[in-house]
Amino acid sequence: MRGPGMRWVAAAAVGALVLSGCASKEERAATTGETSGSGWSAGADTIKIGLISPMTGAYSILGILQENSIRVELDRINQAGGVGGAKLELVVRDSALDPGKAVQAVNELVGDSQVKMVVGPSLSAFYNASKDIYEQNRLLNCQPGVGTGDFSVLKYGFRSQEPNEVGVERLVHYLQSQNVTSLGLVYEADDTGKATDAYLKEFSPKYGITYLGYQQTRPDDQSHRPYLDKLKDAGAIVVSSNAGGAKTMAAADEAGYKGLLTGTSGLQNVSFLDAAGDLAIGSIFVAGNLQFNIRDRATWKPGYRAHVEEVEKRFGLVEGPKSGAKMPKGTAIAADCVKAFAAAADSAKSVEPEKLAEAMAQLDIPDTETPSGNGIKPADHEFYHVGDIHIYRWDKDADGWFITDVTPKS
């Protein structure tokens, strides 16, 4: 594997920073992602960027957050002169959590010659049904909502989310550092649960941890106590990022469980905290850069802070009605797709598909300059790598919820 769902996932070369003071704008753009819209022509007044995501229904929040962040980054690029003199325009299609509609939208956008990149469709199953269409039609695509699958085998597909297996390995490594010697999994019997089970089976022995198995939950479960009781001796339990995870936490509280309750990046979401309430205090989750609930904004990565504060200004915050927890009404990993597209086009001085894909794979954008605060270095078609993955702990005080970065230093 490569180096150590809003289902709610590399420092840049030092030389690039040293040279940026004396290099030309075009040279800086190729390395750092700086875009000016000058020096070459895209041969059009407008370039379209597509977004396919659930904009209605139960997961509409995912699409809304993606659209908001994309618009912020798109407007930033346009204000700086666009891409090759062309202005970027966003076109949005609603997948409505329907794989048929997602594929229909992909077919529509690949048929529009003005569309040069598509973000989505989010969710692994929807992308799996669509990726061959992108490859056959030579259309660049970027995926901030797809956690599984091997992107290194694709030519035109890139991922701007941490791969699930990287996040799970990072979590298991952290548990080892906390002297955890056994762990279990309580999760829905879905694709994500099954994939997490497979990763835990793979990585637990590598880090000297005994894996006690996978307890598959059901939607109609009134309590998760029977599952918890089977794992009561585990040093840590990985829980679902959905409402089911809150049921597991409730069962752990009822049983007096003393181990760590952990999860993947979905535990960052306000909806999870609304379901779990104070039971989430002390829980651990793994995610890419996620500094919003770290209160000292001076510690935030500069590009991330600029992006998040613009999202706050224009779109506001999501606030949990029960928990009072807050998150920005945007998702910066979607904005990274647009950042990377503009940088690749400026580097290639072209929006021709093959040249774009080749340039995208050569990017090396520092984590200080990206909307997400993660470095973008997608030689293997993965934007982020293990060095971008953090471990966070939820805590609460009189001022509300906050997180602490507890990532081991080594």
Image (cartoon, rainbow, N blue to C red):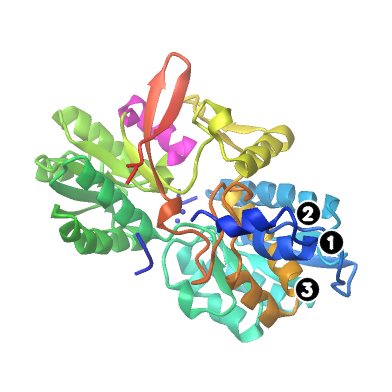
Residue 205 forms part of the magenta stretch:
no
Instruction: Say few, some or many: other residues with alpha carbon within 10 Å of mark 3 (under 14 / 14 to 19 / 20 or more).
Output: many
What's the CA distance linking mark 1 and mark 2? 8 Å
Q: Residues within 10 Å of mark 2 (few under 14, many from 20)?
A: many
Q: Foreground residue, 130 or 383? A: 383
Label disc, if present, on residue 37 of the rendered structure: 1
State whether residue 323 is above or below residue 132.
above
Q: Earlier in the sequence, mark 1 or mark 2?
A: 1
Residue 131 sits above or below residue 333 on the image: below
According to the picture, the residue beneath numbered tag 2 turns out to be 77
Q: Is residue 342 visible?
A: no
Q: Nearer the viewer, residue 331 or 28?
A: 28
Does residue 270 belong to the magenta stretch? yes
Q: Secondary structure at mark 2?
A: helix
- Place of residue 28 in the rendered image (x, y in percent of width and height, measured from the top left): 72, 60
Identify the mark nearer the N-term, 3 or 2.
Answer: 2
User: Hey, which residue is sitting farthest top in the picture?
Assistant: 398
In this view, the residue farthest toward the bottom is: 136
Q: As drawn, is 183 to the left or to the right of 199?
A: left
Q: CA distance from mark 1 to mark 3?
A: 10 Å
Residue 182 spot, x, y in % from top left: 13, 48
Residue 231 image offset from top left, x and y in percent: 13, 44
Residue beneath disc 3: 349
* Tags 1 and 2 touching, CB below 8 Å: yes
Q: CA distance from mark 3 to mark 2?
A: 16 Å
Q: Residue at x 53, y 48 (%)?
A: 58
The magenta segment: 268-281
Residue at image position (29%, 47%) is 220
